[in-house]
Amino acid sequence: MSHSEQRLTARESAPEPRARADFTGGVYGSMLAASVVAGAGGLGEFPRLEMVLLLLFSAVAFWLAHVHAEVFGARLAQRRLDRVVVLHVCREEWPIVNAAVPPAVAVAVSPLLGLDLEGTAWLALTVAVAGQVGWSVAAARRAGASGRLMAVSAAVNLVIGLLIISFKLFVTH
């Protein structure tokens, strides 16, 4: 039995959604959010609203892409496609969207903090990177990793987040 067949069999016998088992989608979604904020160029007349929408719509688009890939790639080849399978995959991949919410909220509340647009972007980027690190630590902890391995996971994700930040600095300066 191949590894993917073993995973599928395990999922069928214990259909706990991956969202509860690990936080891969959250880590990925936080990286996506950080990249969206870092790459957001000139926004229009309502820049904060546009950034919130860009964060949320990008997350939903990537969530749909992941659902599509999972359903029509791995699942369809080994299992009949039905509503239960599709809903299960939708729930598994939902952390991608969840991870975009904190940076979007940061953008939405930034006027209350007296931040200009540049400060807003940096706040959202910081929140996204912090989320990325947090999701990775939560995933490692849920997997039963040692404190050392959780620290390594946090450090790796922090370095990736700092890479995204350096890309923003490089492109905008």
Image (cartoon, grey):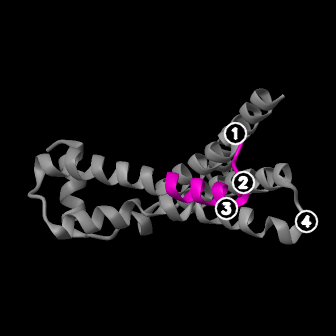
Query: Does label 4 or label 2 sit earlier along the sequence?
Result: 2
Vertical position of residue 22 compared to residue 152: above or below: below
Quarter-of-image position of residue 14: bottom left
Mark 4 nearby-residue class (10 Å; few <14, some 14–19, many ≥20): few
Mark 2 nearby-residue class (10 Å; few <14, some 14–19, many ≥20): few
Name the residue type under label 1: Gly
Q: Do residues under tags 3 and 2 come within 8 Å of each other at their CB atoms?
A: no
Residue 48 seen in this snapshot = yes
Q: Nearer the viewer, mark 2 or mark 1?
A: 2
Q: Do residues under tags 4 and 3 come within 8 Å of each other at their CB atoms?
A: no
Mark linked to residue 45? 2
Picture coordinates of residue 117, whole percent (x, y): 82, 53
Q: Main secondary structure of the magenta part?
A: helix
Picture coordinates of residue 170, whole percent (x, y): 78, 27
- Quadrant containing the C terminus is top right
Quarter-of-image position of residue 127: bottom right
**Callout 3 secondary element:** helix
Vertical position of residue 102 compared to residue 63: above or below: below
Vertical position of residue 20 compared to residue 64: above or below: below
Identify the residue under disc 1. Answer: 41
Name the residue type under label 2: Glu
Q: Residue furthest front?
A: 45
